[in-house]
Image (cartoon, coloured by chain):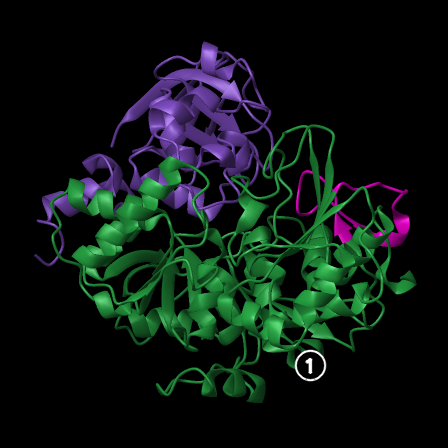
Chain colours: A green, B purple
Amino acid sequence: MTTAEKILARASGRDIVRPGEYVTAKIDKFMSHDAFAAVHMSLASVGVQKICNPERVVVALDHYVPPPTQRAASIHQLVRDGVRKYGITNFYAERGGIAHQVMMEKGHVLPGQLVVGTDSHTCTYGALGAASCGIGFSEMAYALATGKLWFRVPQTIRFELNGELPFPVSSKDIILKIAGDYSAEAAQYKAVEFSGRASRDMSVESRMTISNMAVEIGAKFCFFETDDKTQAYLSNRTHVPYQEIHFEEPSENMEVYHIDVSEMEPVVAIPHCVDNVKQISQLERLEIHQAILGSCTNGRLEDLRIGAEFIKGKTVHPNVRLLVIPASWEIYRQAMDEGLLSIFLEAGGIILNPSCGPCFGAHMGLLAPGERCISSTNRNFKGRMGSDQAEVFLASPATVITSAVHGYIADPRES
Amino acid sequence: MYVIEGRVWVFGDNVDTDAIVAGEYLDAPIEETIKHVFASLKPDFVNEVRQGDVIVAGKNFGCGSSRENAPASLKAVGIKCIIAESFARIFFRNAIAIGLPVISALGVPGRFQEGDTASIDFSRSMIVNVTDGDSLPAEPLADEMIEILDSGGILEVLRRHGGGNQ
């Protein structure tokens, strides 16, 4: 069986499941963020007083931190009220960070678990070998009340990443290139397994960047195998035993894409689709007004280190506002201890608190009509980050920072 | 199940959740979000949509966020059913979960003009263009989804079952 089939079979109490079948599966972990306010109201609307497994629930405020409006502040009040009412102890208020990062760095996610979250980027936990996916708040209310949810067993496809990735090309370039080459629908309803030398060479953080964006190619789940890097990551964070994830040989009918990363170039996703991808060398000179280094895609320590390396001793272009957003308080503190934050400050960057920030268009760095932003986030949809007459380009941390220095979208190999 | 008939609005591929309702209204109540549905993609939509209308779209409808206000706003402005070549999975689940019928039909783009009348027969999984008599098969919905739709949404299923384990 594939990884997705094994996990769904185990969670639904069956020996075997097949793609296309529907199963009702027991959920191992539940993640919610500011949307827990809506979950709470949904539970209340149908008279649910108690949830099944409060110890399996993690709630972290991340979208509206700190609240930019009275309405957002009221939403956070509702979240706190719900967390108290249902006895949820794994609650990270403003001092946790982006929920996905908190889930992984605080040891809430283990290989082989079935996890649902009220956010489309819940698939990020596949970097650690969990079957994780996004759902809406009504389904979350149902899942919390009953402990279960229906799933269609997905087909599985595999991307075998071969070769050695040439620095400063990164895992962000790989997932953008996959979206560009195979489309935003490449993995629609499917589970994706990432294998090959380049997958094994990657840090757990780099794997998280890929699994985070798996939903941008339509994927339901995304998996990386358990190896010494996974073990090292988890050993500092949890003592709970887990089942390692190892892929079986692909069956004859599994679609396997072989990708050689050794010749790969830095790429950029052009507005307004994630799969509208070009090599950076093919771009005309495009001036920018904002650059963002952060988010659940690329706001980890590794990303901040690369950013600092590319900006050290330089300054942000006067026409550009550079926003640096560590993905969590743990990362924020480490970046401070390593001196990375002072490098960004001295270069003229604005350091924001760990949060989703402007990524989803609510606050802290929105775009005016005609403005252009290069961002290490995961979506460039029209109007996502402010005006629908603005443009968002997606790229790696190295490309974002190089561009912030030059004032236009620039190749990090020529910085 | 049942048959839905309605006037058609036509959309292309990759209509994302920000195009349905922009992120700045993510925390807004539904009375507010319905004023901004398809604001940049089809500015006339909110003024001209009528109760009972149907959307016909291309590939990957509803891609992007897990925000439930996307299908909920479409339902609230009067959309009775969405037919698409394919749906993004979270949008598809959310639509079923709030009791908005959605159905995939390969080859549906190009089979309808804006303003045509579409008829969707869920028991036979057939889609008919009433305006020109054309018809095509759709992908049947699973029993789990039909139970949720018949109940009026997953929260109604929960209410009916006495709130889960309680």
The residue nearer to you, when weighing B2 against B43, is B43
A196 displayed left or right of A108: right
Q: Which residue is nearer to you in this view: A341 or A304?
A: A341
Q: Indicate the quadrant where residue B52 lies.
A: top left
Quarter containing the N terminus of chain B: top left
Q: Is residue A281 visible?
A: yes
- Percent position (x, y) of residue A56? 28, 69
Viewed as shown, does residue A321 lie left or right of B20?
right
Q: Secondary structure at mark 1?
A: helix
Magenta span? A268-289
**What amino acid type is highlighted by mark number 1?**
Asp
Q: Tell me where residue A287 appears, x and y as whole percent.
A: 84, 40
> Label 1, on which residue?
A201
Is A177 covered by the magenta stretch? no
10 Å crowding of disc 1: few (<14), some (14-19), many (20+)? some
* Residue A154 visible within the image: no
Q: Residue at x 54, y 15 (%)?
A: B114
Quick check: B103 above or below B9?
below
